[in-house]
Amino acid sequence: MKGLPNFIQYQNGELWLTENERDNLKISYRIRDIIYAEQSPYQHVMILDSYDFGRMLVLDGVVQTTSIDGFIYNEMISHVPLTFHPNPKRVLVIGGGDCGAAREIAKYENVEQIDLVEIDQLVVQVCKDHLQEVSGNLSDPRVRFVYSDGVAFVREAVDTYDVIIVDSSDPVGPAKQLFEFDFYRNLHRALKADGIMVCQSQSPIFHAEVMVETYKSIQRLFPTTLLYTAVVPTYPGGLWSYTLGSKIHEQPANIRSFDKQTRYVNRDILEQCFKVPQFVKELL
Amino acid sequence: MKGLPNFIQYQNGELWLTENERDNLKISYRIRDIIYAEQSPYQHVMILDSYDFGRMLVLDGVVQTTSIDGFIYNEMISHVPLTFHPNPKRVLVIGGGDCGAAREIAKYENVEQIDLVEIDQLVVQVCKDHLQEVSGNLSDPRVRFVYSDGVAFVREAVDTYDVIIVDSSDPVGPAKQLFEFDFYRNLHRALKADGIMVCQSQSPIFHAEVMVETYKSIQRLFPTTLLYTAVVPTYPGGLWSYTLGSKIHEQPANIRSFDKQTRYVNRDILEQCFKVPQFVKELL
């Protein structure tokens, strides 16, 4: 590695990553070590060892997931749709290169196939090699890795999946199209007649417009549309939203029998996550 | 005001407040204007106008509450105990100088007296003058302001209150004693025979030891001890904990009839807040 990567600064002999995605709020993480840093064809990819959050995946200077709190996001984007659907067999993950969602899905013995479509092969590789607290060094034979554009992939799929999980980064750069209506329409078509989709729909506090627009798009397509929230410490504002669209199932099917080994999710959390704070309710 | 107050820096012609309470994580807020900055006998007190969070109360360089998210913390520390108790008449708030908790308590018509014991009169004054989004410029005649040490105050009170709310800052500086066992024992004595107390018990992620210790202290004194959580965006980690101790009531009494005008709390939130993530459950 030649010199210091972009996004990292020396301050008083210490290494710091400063996220300044939002111009008027900056979060700075003190870094113990730069484990990996390269430019992929799609984005700048780093694995950093931080003091407070352990190892972190950083794309284009923005923290995506960490050893300390990655389990929260990944458990919530996976177990909610998988307990909502009565019998999921084929699951598609769009994005999710950190492998954390696929790792959670692999806890369901009845699931037969997990397609993980990630545009950036380098992200999968570095997370498997250097971020095993999140990826679990996933090697389940049911997981099929497809390194291609998720938008194009779902355009070709019809009546194929029980559950689709859109585990995207923020709606800028490569992930922008994953927040557009055409994409959700193609997702709807890629699902079986009783299929369920989930996407992350950003912060109710800092990205309320994106959240509301995502919810409305999904609501145009799916008779049951539900927003749920979780707390993700490394995302701005802490409170994070997900939106679930279901073609026919109106209620979660398997919460009461939930028995997976998890650190954030439990039966209570699965039940209550759809009950959102008053200001979020009023936004929708 | 002479010169720039401590805690504020100029960077590229912009004003920034950088919180570095935790040495390895820094949150920086871009500031539009310094509304107020003075040293009180107890601490450095500022009201800042920030770009992302509106006006903020900052004590010794640490953000305490903001126009944008102050309602979350204050609604959760107030409405949970007030709906848990079947008929609260006399309420004590220790700390709470931003007046936000007292403002929420004043929404209960049956409450006859609200004693607010804040050590630092300047905090109350600047919040009433410059932070009315939080304080509501509270002028309810049932509120009695007592400017003195909360620790000494509860030592003198016996069998007096239905509900006591400990709305403290972090367990450093003036608030340190508010996290000690002797203080909770005095609180217990200051409560009536069916009284209920609540305190903020810090972050389950960053201050897990403080949270667990607080919970255990309260559990030694109160037959019913319950931890609940909320999301406070300006506190590190986002996820925040509160601990409730109840002398006899085992279940919330008045959730289903909750009818106050609020922005975070609703009946669902009041019901579900006691159901905590798996890793928090395992800590206790």
Image (cartoon, coloured by chain):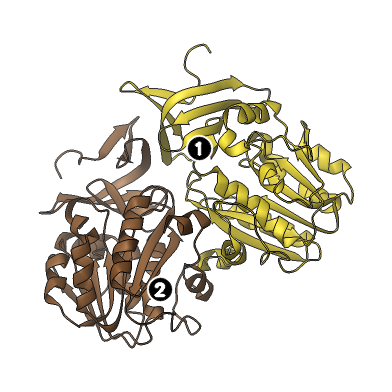
Chain colours: A yellow, B brown
Q: Nearer the viewer, residue B197 or A215?
A: B197
Q: Which residue position is annotated with label 2?
A: B80
- Which dot marks residue A21? 1
- The answer to whether residue B106 is above or below residue A268 is below
- Camera-side residue of B208 and A176: B208
* Tag 1 and tag 2, C-beta contact below 8 Å: no
Specify whether residue A12 is in view: yes
- Residue B2 in the image, given as x and y percentages of width and height: 14, 41
Going by the image, does B133 lie left or right of A110?
Answer: left
Describe the element under mark 2 as helix, strand or loop. helix
The kind of residue tagged 1 is: Glu
Residue B228: quadrant of the picture: bottom left
The image quadrant of residue B11 is: top left
> In this view, which residue lies farthest toward the top?
A2
Residue A177, image x, y percentages: 72, 41
Mark pair 1, 2: CA separation: 35 Å
Question: Subunit of mark 1?
Answer: A
Mark 2 — on which chain does it sit?
B
